[in-house]
Image: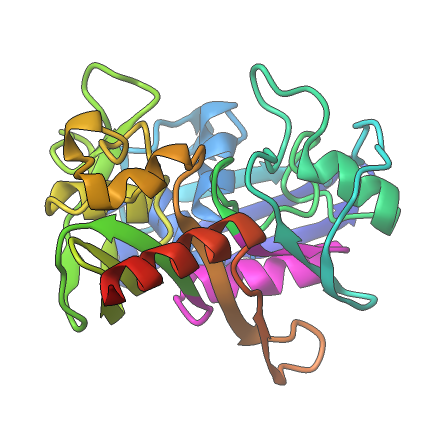
């Protein structure tokens, strides 16, 4: 099992002798199992930056570890965030010494990326909260999970590394409950489960797809459904957290989210006269409405809810009136 030389300003050095029960396992999968405090993506970054050695040599993620093989891992110390704090408005649902839960507006990017160097949720959190965990890296401090730019709703961030590790563990083990509200084209029944793997689109690299060669398991469940005369308002639970998962899954079964220009939710030929009210929607009708998890400090169950933003409530009101007329 892992042996650590301890933590210092340079990070942590871990050594592992591959146990018999894990012989023949890919090294990335082995480390995810034996180092539960670190996420899969973090371990993959360690491998890609040559911080993992197998029998004294840098290794690729796909290499299989034999029984008794020596694995050495150099884990860098958490990076102190250097992003610029910005005084941006935040809808804070809950805050304590360990976590902060935000109702993110549509249009706000969660963290800095290409084309988004300011105005992100992270910039706002650094101003509001002062300090965030460094595990996510310099550009993603405190960020345990994400919401797409166009998606509104609940997101939890960690204020320190211990909280980040515990929340990350709950996400990996699918203990955190995430429920969304979406308006989709066509009729769909509650109780339907969508189990289609998701990966990067083969030619359009900004999109995801259920027909990718390299894909990962993704499971989405429809838990509620309200018919609205050619549209359906649904409650969605996700058991995995893949990029664009809900949007991709619903589009794949022929029910794209209203307002989603990337995955077919805004095609003009869909707009019958009774549906012209949705043409003005400039964002996907997708909102993270409920988030439930065990608090990282004392493990008590906590639950947070966020109602639909005003523009979605108004659209829904009009659609319901129309459906009843």
Q: To which quarter of the image does residue 220 belong?
A: bottom left
Tell me if residue 227 is in the magenta stretch.
Answer: no
Q: Nearer the viewer, residue 79 or 279?
A: 279
Please report the residue visible at 14 percent of the width from the left and 42 percent of the height from the top: 252
Image position of 308 (left or right of 180): right
Q: Position of residue 74 (x, y in %)?
A: 60, 37
Q: Nearer the viewer, residue 130 or 278?
A: 278
* Colouring convention used in this rendered image of the protein: rainbow
Please report the residue visible at 48 percent of the width from the left and 44 percent of the height from the top: 151
Visible residue check, residue 27: no
Tell me if residue 175 is in the magenta stretch.
Answer: yes
Quarter placement of the C terminus: bottom left
Visible residue check, residue 11: yes
**Numbered-mark total:** 0
Q: Nearer the viewer, residue 193 or 184?
A: 184
Residues in magenta?
A: 153-178
Please report the residue visible at 62 percent of the width from the left and 46 percent of the height from the top: 143
Image position of 51 (left or right of 253): right
Q: Position of residue 212 (x, y in %)?
A: 16, 30
Looking at this rendering, what residue extends furthest in the front direction? Answer: 325
Residue 232 versus residue 85 in the image, above or below: below
Q: Nearer the viewer, residue 250 or 199?
A: 250
Please report the residue visible at 52 percent of the width from the left and 48 percent of the height from the top: 311
Image position of 220 (left or right of 12): left
Q: To which quarter of the image does residue 82 belong?
A: top right
Residue 62 versus residue 274 in the image, above or below: above
Q: Position of residue 303 (x, y in %)?
A: 57, 77
Q: Position of residue 308 (x, y in %)?
A: 52, 59
């Amino acid at each position: 099992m892992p042996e650590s030389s301890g933590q210092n300003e340079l990070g942590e050095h871990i050594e592992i002798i591959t146990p018999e029960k894990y012989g023949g396992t890919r090294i990335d999968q082995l480390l995810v199992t034996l180092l539960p405090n670190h996420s899969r993506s973090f371990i993959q970054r360690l491998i890609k930056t040559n911080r993992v050695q197998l029998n004294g040599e840098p290794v690729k993620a796909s290499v299989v570890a034999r029984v008794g093989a020596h694995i050495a891992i150099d884990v860098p110390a958490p990076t102190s965030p250097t992003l610029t704090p910005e005084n941006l408005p935040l809808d804070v649902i809950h805050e304590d010494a360990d976590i902060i839960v935000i109702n993110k507006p549509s249009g706000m990017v969660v963290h800095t990326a290409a084309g988004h160097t300011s105005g992100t949720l992270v910039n706002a959190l650094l101003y509001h909260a002062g300090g965030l965990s460094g595990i996510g890296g310099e550009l993603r401090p405190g960020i345990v999970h994400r919401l797409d730019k166009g998606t509104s709703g609940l997101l939890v961030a960690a204020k320190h590394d211990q909280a980040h590790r515990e929340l990350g563990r709950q996400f990996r083990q699918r203990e955190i409950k995430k429920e969304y509200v979406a308006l989709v084209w066509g009729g769909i029944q509650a109780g339907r489960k969508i189990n289609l793997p998701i990966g990067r689109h083969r030619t359009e690299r900004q999109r995801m797809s259920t027909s990718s060669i390299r894909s990962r398991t993704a499971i989405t469940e429809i838990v509620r459904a309200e018919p609205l005369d050619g549209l359906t308002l649904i409650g969605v639970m996700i058991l995995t957290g893949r990029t664009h998962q809900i949007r991709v899954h619903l589009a794949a079964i022929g029910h794209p989210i209203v307002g989603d220009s990337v995955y077919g939710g805004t095609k003009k030929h869909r707009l019958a006269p009774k549906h012209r009210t949705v043409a003005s929607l400039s964002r996907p009708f997708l909102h993270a409405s409920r988030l439930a998890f065990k608090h990282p400090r004392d493990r008590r169950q906590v639950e947070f809810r966020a109602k639909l933003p005003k523009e979605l409530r108004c659209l829904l009101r009009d659609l319901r009136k129309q459906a009843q007329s």
